[in-house]
Image: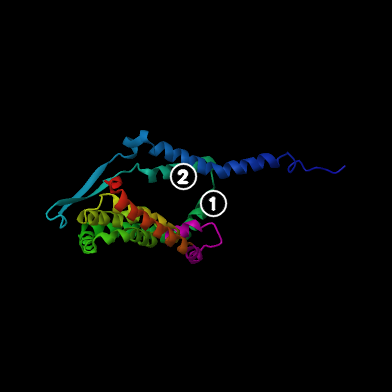
Amino acid sequence: MPITDRRTAGGEGEPLQTRQVVAALLPFVVLIAVVVAWTGPWSTRFAGYVVHKYTVTAGSSIPHGKAVAATFSLTPFIAGTAILTAWVVIMLALRPTGREVAQVFRRSFSQMWGALLVGVFIFGLAFVFNFAGLGNSLAYGFSRIGKPFILLAPILGWIGVALSGSNTSTNALFGGFQLTIGRLLNFPVTLLPTLNSVGAEVGKPVAPQTASVGVSTSRYVRNEGTVIRHNMAWTLVLLGYLVVIGLVFYEVAPQAFR
């Protein structure tokens, strides 16, 4: 009779395979559980706890003489801290060796260092742009276009995310700018910021930062341009569709954005 290897026929191999599957899924389960528990509606006081606020006030040119404030809130328990906590829990559960952790950090930094720099520089630019009067000056210039500016609002969001790779960064950079233009042109107050944000999301597939993260575990590492070129036409189609939606809402149901 043929001899059956128990490791491949219900012996040691089966429990080993099960442990590997559990180890592979555990980080995702822990991450989801920690973030949901940390940021749910029941945790607003904890996650939103502000240790200190740093505020600088200045005069705004649009509208003339109105005081504006630039505020930085030190909130150490926001969602980013939840992800860090999830990482610590995963490390305690899986117990990787120091060599494995160092290898992961080296590979991750090699793949992500550009994206890390982009986030820092874009938010720095956004604060200077908004609170040094650049945003208001640019908004005043664009407002001279008049009502047709609604065609450009989602395009600016698309351009912003193509440069920064982040919807959040794009909103930080152009959100106030779009809001100011809307006020100058008497648009529904949330229409242009909404088009800016959705336009940014449409542009995510061609954002270098997003492409870099997306291909980090594939054969397209250092060849993100191929992915971006493939996605470009589709994002332009969706962008055109978004422009049409914006026009329809403005002409037919502007009250939806009031």
Q: Using the numbered discs, state the Cα–Cα distance from disc 2 to disc 1 in whole angstroms.
A: 14 Å
At mark 1, the secondary structure is helix
Picture coordinates of residue 204 (x, y %)? 42, 57
State the residue position of label 2.
87
Q: Nearer the viewer, residue 206 or 224?
A: 206
Magenta segment includes 211: yes
From which residue to which does the magenta span run?
A: 208-230
Amino acid type assigned to the residue bearing label 1 in the image = Glu
Name the residue at 51% across, 66% down.
226
Within-10-Å neighbours for mark 2: few <14, some 14–19, many 20+ = some
Name the residue at 28% across, 61% down.
148
Q: How many marks?
A: 2
Q: Who comes first in sequence, dot 2 or dot 1?
A: 2
Amino acid type assigned to the residue bearing label 2 in the image = Trp
At mark 2, the secondary structure is helix
Picture coordinates of residue 195 (x, y %)? 33, 54
Q: Main secondary structure of the magenta part?
A: helix
Do tag 2 and tag 1 residues touch (Cβ < 8 Å)? no
- Residue 111's tag is none
- Residue 100's tag is 1
